[in-house]
Image (tube, rainbow, N blue to C red):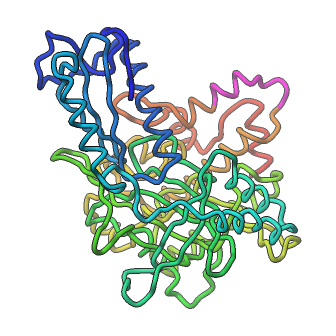
Amino acid sequence: MHVNRYSESAAFASGPRVTPRAFVLPDGDASQHSRERLLWQAFQILSRQHRTFVFMLSICGDGYARFARLDRSDCLISEQFNYIAHPEVIGTFLYRLSQMNAAQRGHDPSATLASGEEVERFSTLQSVYEGAPWMVRRLRHAMTEGWSICKLAVHSGDSLNEYPPQEYLVGRPAYMSPTVCGRGTKGFVALNLTENTAVFIKDSWRLRVSATRPERDIYEYLWEDPAPRMYVLTLLAGEDVGAPAFPQFTFTPEGPLSSRVHCRLVFKEICRDLNDFKGSRELVHIIHDALLGHRWAWEERKMLHRDVSVGNILIYDNPEKPDSPSKGLLCDWGLAKSAAEIKNPRASQASRPGTWQFMSALLSWYPQKDHLLSDDLESFMHVLTWCTMMYLPISATYSEEKLATTMSNYFDEYSGGHRGSSYKFESVLGAVVPSGDCRKTILSIY
């Protein structure tokens, strides 16, 4: 529930002069702040609970209110109603809500609260990995006080009648997407209750578009090759949640937005983020490993990743061999396409693929350009440049303010017509890296 005392600060148009079916987003700062608060509340609910959607009630002190339903694709808003003249509207809604089952109220039926015995098993898993401090940190994070421990049921594929689902315990996510709408990705360090081992679960909402293959299918295709599958995550299980009988979709009315389907993937490796690298040598080593994985996928399996970014390169430390060198892994193949699909493209989403900060200069300037191998290779360069500027020592004469401005101009800038950074474009065109003292640091890495 979200309450505004005055109509001037209402998240949505409110008042007797607003026609019942009119839907207007007031552009005042107070109204915008109210909408941000409403979205923040929805984000907290979706982050801490396993949900498919959430109901909300926005009340204004002038006597008017609206209902809202938010999921990972859309936010549906009711027409306004006068709750003082017609209190039965809220009463009827609350009564009907109380008569719904958990799934109808937006809870994910494939997730249930863990028992006390199961929670105890999860907490003792840290002792199994005492020789791997990064694993212990991950498991402690998952057991953060105030976060529920839940049990997820995940099938290994579409043969639901042949193989019963595996059950996993999860707690606080190791990663959460910072937005309400979109993929809503959450990553969990999980306990496989059958094998008593730690695994990693990726929970997300993929686009429900026929031209886009599910990420699970891409991993399975990559792993069909008997050649060494180095530098790519090991998929253990995956499914569209509830499929094929009761798949979980977002509700999207007719319009430009595509609906999304809830999916889960289970991986063998539990990794560190790239920004957790220990020094410049490890940084280059990890990115080089990911590049080798990218090369293998393209040359041997004819698959192009199309979303090379800092978030999609991971550092894997083998918990069974703590003294062995770390290895770089390339993950998140949800936007990947085959060479045949690139040669004969079909529209799969409204916006260009990839992560804006690491997108090639040409792609950021020409959205209709086909995403090619050269674009991915350039993205690796931008990843190395970004990590160097963000985390490695820069000359004392190069102030933090100047560094922040340089990084913003290079990685974040939008030019006219939603084009990318002119600074990045000119730098790539001229085969140079950002100027100044930070340029020396970058060149020393290259």
Classify 280 as above or below 248: above
Q: Residue 208, how many percent across, how many down?
A: 29, 60
**411 or 147, which lies in front?**
147
Classify 366 as above or below 408: below
Residue 437 showing in the rendered view: yes
- Image quadrant where residue 255 sits: top left
Q: Residue 144, how many percent across, how many down?
A: 69, 49
Task: Give the number of marks.
Answer: 0
Q: Residue 146, how many percent across, how many down?
A: 64, 45
Please state if 380 lies on the left or on the right of 131 as rendered: left
Please state if 266 lies on the left or on the right of 52 as rendered: right
Classify 226 as above or below 315: below
Q: Residue 134, how many percent across, how many down?
A: 79, 59
- Image quadrant where residue 318 sits: bottom right
**292 or 199, which lies in front?**
199
- Image quadrant where residue 84 sits: top left
Say if the magenta span includes residue 341: no
**87 or 114, which lies in front?**
87
Please state if 3 lies on the left or on the right of 127 as rendered: left
Say if the magenta span includes residue 405: yes
* Residue in view at x 27 percent, y 49 percent: 99
Classify 233 as above or below 420: below
**Quarter holding the N terminus?**
top left
Which stretch did the figure color magenta? 395-406
* Residue in view at x 65 percent, y 40 percent: 433
Residue 288 showing in the rendered view: no
* Residue in view at x 57 percent, y 52 percent: 309
* Residue in view at x 40 percent, y 12 percent: 30
